[in-house]
Image: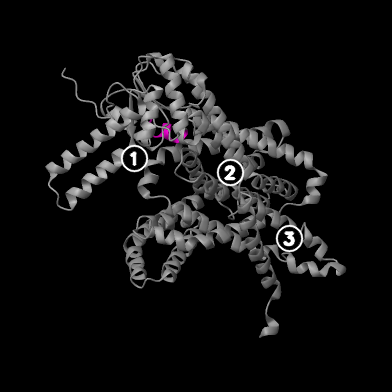
Amino acid sequence: MAAEFDTSSLGDALVILGAAGIVIPAFARFKINPVIGFILVGIIAGPFGLGQLAMKEEMRWLQHITIQDPEAITPFADFGVILLLFAIGLELSFKRLWTMRKMVFGIGAAELLVTASIFGAVLLFFIGWEFRSAAALGLALAMSSTALVLPISGTKSPVGRAALAMLLFEDVALVPMLFFFGTVGGADVEGLTKVAINGAIVVTAMLLVGKFLLSPLFAQAARTKSPEGFFAISLLTVILAAAATAAVGLSPILGALIAGMLIAETDYHAEVEIVIAPLKGLGLGVFLITIGMLIDIGALAQQWHLLIGSLAGVIAAKAVVTGFLLRIAGARRGVAAETGILMASPSETTLILLGAAGTAGVLGMETVAFWSAVTALGLTITPFLASLGRIAGHRVEKEASAQEMEHDPANGRTVIFGFGRVGQMVADMLSEHDRPYLGIDSNIDGVSRLREEGFNVLYGDVARSELIEKLGLNKAAALVLTMDDPVLTARISRNVRKLYPELPIIARARDSEHAANLYKAGVTDAVPEALEASLQLSEAVLVDIGVAMGPVIASIHQKRSDLRDEIMKDSEMAQQPTLGRRRPSSS
């Protein structure tokens, strides 16, 4: 039995596991996306790298560190993508997906069809391809990478939500595209209708079974306190769901996504996310290694200008179209720019469609090989595109904020410098009393997110004096300083007080000493958060242990008065500070 053991498969497994053990910690140490590392492993250990040398007699020892049978690991790579979509489904819910339906079938459909039409038109009218071949390649290149984009963007940020909507539509559209390519013998409208009906039946059955069976199964696993039970049920669910959708002609990744969403509706989704995470990461790594094995360095060297030019054209077209459509849909400029660049490279699905088109004779095998190399190269640079998109989004958002500041933005508003937790609470209270406000913050990611949530906030570095001048604070109702930087808060207070003597300035202080310094700097009110929190905590403790409310309130007031006296002494003030507790006016 031992003599019959397939050592080549064991060697491939060792290469993959060794790569994961080296790549993940090494690239994390240097804060580099491990995606690049896995693709590099595929290039080096694959048939176009050291695999070529391992064929020579004198270099046979290289077989121990190369992948001898790339096709043998393809099923594991496909399973990695399925697990990835399953994990994405765990972050969703049917309610959330329903709220996204307009975006999925609106911007998602428009992005795919417009991009594919542009590519197809170029091939049809400028290069002279026949219609079916031009349409096939156009649709293939219009696809974007679910496996790489969503782990980078997430699904909760504005960029992540936009990317998710477009990628969901692409996943749904994959089946009719495969029919279009003719991968199913004699595929016609009748065959497509049959798949749609069977698919609807299978998905409905999955929803019903999942709703009534999953919670009891996970509850039993929870009673036994067995992580293995959670793992086994989760794995069984995703495999059955993927197999069911694949059996009726739908994409298995659609089944995996639905399986994740079904578990997300239960009370056990957090535990499932934890137990499935290692396997998901390893599966994605295997998939990326297979992508790297498609890259022929020799071919790149011979026609690098053509490959790079083609990839650049695809990326530029997709980035412009996606960004433009998102702007039309109402997305902010920064979100549109970042999402467009992030979604610009081709997809792992592109490779599937190219292979299907080649098998059906819609595309020639040389064409398939060339665009497969372009796609693999595009997947390799997706992390770089994500970084480039983030930089572009930040720059566009800064420019947009600068333009908005040109039009007297502070007029009649309470301006809030620093829009973190404290600034947002102040803004909420102002909105509660129908008082206009304007938030200023230097965290561009936070600004983009908060604007999507409905807050009136602009990007700006409050440390720069030019910003204060542009805001027109002379027309503001008040200035609120919430930054957790004592030196910066005091400096801004001093500068603003010199420019605008009548402007109310309310500042967040750390303690009584900081409050005294801020009063010296010219603030109208300084609220020492640590002291106020301590007084409220003391009040709660005294009441909870049985001290009468009256004496407790009296002692708290006396303590606050003592703190006022201390701040008066430290700041050499003529009048006692309010400590944020103004008396209501008699009017």
Marks 2,3: beta carbons within 8 A: no
Q: Quadrant of the C terminus?
A: top left
Which residue type carries mark 2? Answer: Met
Numbered tag placed on residue 143 in the rendering:
2
Spot the residue most to the right.
58
Query: Of the residues tagged 2 and 3, which is closer to the observer?
Result: 3
Q: Main secondary structure of the magenta part?
A: helix
Element under disc 2: loop
Q: Which residues are magenta?
A: 448-455
Q: Which mark is residue 530?
A: 1
Labels 3 and 1: the sequence-earlier one: 3
Q: Residue at x 30, y 32 (%)?
A: 566
* First reached walking from the N terminus: tag 2 or tag 3: 3
Q: Secondary structure at mark 3?
A: helix
Residue type, mark 3 in image: Ala
Residue 45: image tag: 3
Q: CA distance from mark 3 to mark 1?
A: 58 Å
- Location of residue 227 (image quadrant): bottom left
Question: Which one is in front, 245 or 270?
Answer: 270
Name the element at disc 1: helix
Question: Can the viewer see residue 346 in this picture?
Answer: no
Q: Is residue 569 left or right of residue 288?
A: left
